Amino acid sequence: MDRIKTKRIYEEASPDDGLRVLVDRLWPRGVKKDRIDQWAKELAPSTELREEFHAHDFDFDEFRARYRVELEGKEDAMRALAAETDGTITLLYGLKDEKHNHAVILAGAMRDLAG
């Protein structure tokens, strides 16, 4: 069973979510703080990378490559997050696209780190 999941912050919370961690750099509009357990904005893409991607300066494959480079310096933060629980961790994001977002990339990086 995969213990790292991704989910839109606007979806209904579920007991299966386990530890709910917001991984956006900016707080999502209309979301109350009781909807999350932690806010790991240090694991979100840099403001520059996020703005360039949303301006369509490059495609998702390029975004993925550049974000993975940013994550190379954040292994300790990813390990610390993974150590918070033995159960499920749900990485929450605000974007509408469920396949092309930074939370999917972060989940993959955390899985790779865990081996």
Image (cartoon, rainbow, N blue to C red):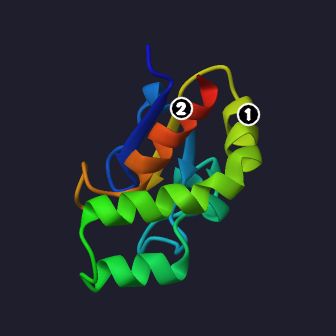
Quarter residue 89 falls in: top right
> Foreground: 98 or 46?
46
> Foreground: 70 or 84?
70
Quarter residue 5 falls in: top left
Q: What element does badge 1 sit on? A: loop
Disc 2 crowd, CA 10 A, few/some/many (<14, 14-19, 20+) = few
The residue drawn where x is 52% and y is 75% is 26
Q: Comparing marks 1 and 2, which lies closer to the viewer?
A: 2
Q: What element does badge 2 sit on? A: helix
From this view, report whether residue 28 is shown above or below residue 23.
below
Say whether residue 21 is visible: yes
Say whether residue 39 is visible: no
Q: Which mark is residue 74?
A: none
Spatial separation of the CA atoms under disc 1 and disc 2 = 17 Å
> Foreground: 19 or 46?
46
Kindly identify which residue carries mark 1.
84
Q: Tell me: 29 left or right of 20.
A: left
Going from N to C along the chain, the mark reached first, 1 or 2, is: 1
Give amino acid for label 2. Asp
> Which corner quadrant holds the N terminus?
top left
The residue drawn where x is 47% and y is 40% is 107
Quarter residue 19 falls in: top right
Disc 1 crowd, CA 10 A, few/some/many (<14, 14-19, 20+) = few
- Residue 28 in percent (x, y) is at 44, 71
Kindly identify which residue carries mark 2.
112
- Residue 30 in percent (x, y) is at 41, 72
- Residue 91 in percent (x, y) is at 49, 45
